[in-house]
Image (tube, coloured by chain):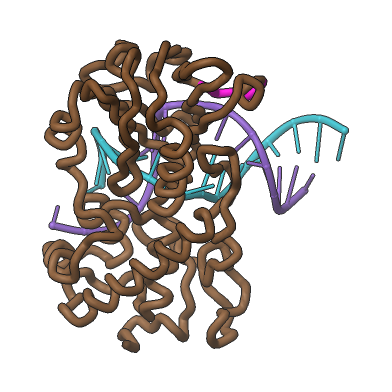
Chain colours: A brown, B purple, C cyan
DNA sequence: CCTTAATCCTGGAAGC
DNA sequence: TGCTTCCAGGATTAAG
């Protein structure tokens, strides 16, 4: 699923349901989805802890307990983290970890394709020092100066750089394509050609797109649902992603699909000229 | 340094 | 209807 708006939607819907609850027991149904130093140790996944808060950096979540324990959840492509009644979970396939939190209340990690995972840490400091230190600034918080500096370190295609979580954390294939369209940028423009003014425009557009997407509950293409099982609605506002062969919403030209950085890329040949149109 | 392909998996959609 | 093929929101690794 899950790029920044979807993960932020999960964070919000989840926090409302789990903060303040005590984790009575953790069931690990499939051990290999639990990774990191505390792998396989239920106690490292908040067993016995009361949940204090749910954090997010880029596409990753961290459920923090009041004893300092942290379960960092990365949803990968098909992962979901939900909270609900026993009945809501009953019959679901691919539920790998379950946190029992009182009568008829549980949180579960489900991931059919198993590209996601859970990393247990003993403290928030350990999470930041061992894992989140590898991520760049969150896409909602990055400054023009930092974005420009990170982009200018490489000559790769702009799209490839924006997908790199060390450059900016939270963007994936959907929101990079949307961002490049609204900023009128060609996906293969060299990243080191981004000047300060352009970086500033990109930051403004990035924040606006991500905010609108969060307000719509994220984009649901296939699997994504929030912590209460609700689908998002932003897919209906996509300007280019998933619209190959359809008319550009701005100029009516047929949108084209190419492959950039190994990913399907949809763009408008008129609105996103190679030379850059401003 | 950079790009591409393969890889981890399941399952939905499209094609025949 | 059924079988096959292709494709997918991520991220790492190896190979060229």
> Does residue A68 show up magenta in the picture?
no
**Image side of residue A256 versus residue A206, left or right:** right
Q: Nearer the viewer, residue A129 or A185?
A: A129
Going by the picture, which residue comes out furthest to the front? A20
Vertical arrangement, residue A246 with respect to residue A61, above or below: below
Q: Quadrant of the C terminus of chain A?
A: bottom left
Residue A137 position in % (x across, y down): 20, 54
**Image side of residue B9 versus residue A3, left or right:** right
| Residue at point 58%, 18% (across, down) | A104
| Residue at point 48%, 42% (across, down) | A13
Vertical arrangement, residue A26 with respect to residue C14, above or below: above
| Residue at point 35%, 73% (across, down) | A205
Is any atom of residue A122 visible in this view? yes
Give the magenta part as a residue range: A91-95
Is any atom of residue A154 visible in this view? no
Q: Main secondary structure of the magenta part?
A: loop
Residue C5 position in % (x across, y down): 62, 42
Q: Nearer the viewer, residue A273 or A230?
A: A230
Q: Nearer the viewer, residue A134 or A186?
A: A134
Vertical arrangement, residue A275 with respect to residue A146, above or below: below
Query: In which quadrant of the rendered view does residue A132 lie?
Result: top left
| Residue at point 21%, 24% (across, down) | A68
**Image side of residue A221 versus residue A16, left or right:** right
Q: Nearer the viewer, residue A125 or A203?
A: A125
Query: In which quadrant of the rendered view does residue A214 lie?
Result: bottom left
Residue A43 position in % (x across, y down): 30, 12
Vertical arrangement, residue A183 with respect to residue C13, above or below: below
Q: How many marks?
A: 0
Residue A33 position in % (x across, y down): 39, 22
């Amino acid at each position: 699923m899950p790029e920044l708006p979807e993960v932020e939607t999960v964070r919000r819907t989840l926090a409302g349901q789990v903060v303040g609850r005590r984790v009575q027991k953790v069931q690990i149904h499939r051990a290999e989805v639990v990774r990191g130093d505390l792998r396989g140790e239920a106690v490292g996944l908040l067993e016995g802890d009361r949940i204090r808060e749910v954090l997010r950096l880029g596409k990753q979540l961290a459920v923090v307990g009041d004893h300092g324990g942290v379960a960092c959840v990365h949803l990968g492509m098909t992962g979901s983290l939900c909270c609900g009644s026993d009945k809501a979970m009953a019959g679901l396939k691919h539920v790998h970890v379950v946190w029992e939190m009182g009568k008829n209340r549980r949180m579960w990690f489900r991931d059919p394709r198993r590209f996601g995972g859970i990393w247990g840490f003993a403290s928030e400091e350990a999470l930041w020092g061992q894992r989140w230190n590898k991520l760049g600034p969150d896409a909602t918080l990055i400054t023009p100066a930092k974005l420009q500096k990170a982009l200018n370190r490489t000559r790769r295609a702009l799209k490839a750089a924006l997908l790199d979580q060390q450059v900016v954390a939270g963007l994936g294939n959907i929101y990079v394509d949307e961002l490049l369209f609204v900023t009128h940028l060609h996906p293969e423009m060299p990243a080191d050609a981004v000047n300060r003014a352009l970086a500033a425009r990109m930051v403004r557009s990035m924040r606006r797109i991500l905010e609108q997407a969060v307000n719509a509950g994220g984009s649901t293409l296939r699997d994504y649902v929030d912590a209460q099982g609700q689908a998002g609605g932003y897919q209906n506002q996509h300007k280019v992603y998933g619209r190959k062969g359809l008319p550009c919403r701005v100029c009516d030209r047929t949108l084209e699909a190419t492959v950039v950085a190994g990913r399907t890329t949809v763009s408008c040949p008129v609105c996103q000229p190679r030379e850059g149109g401003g």
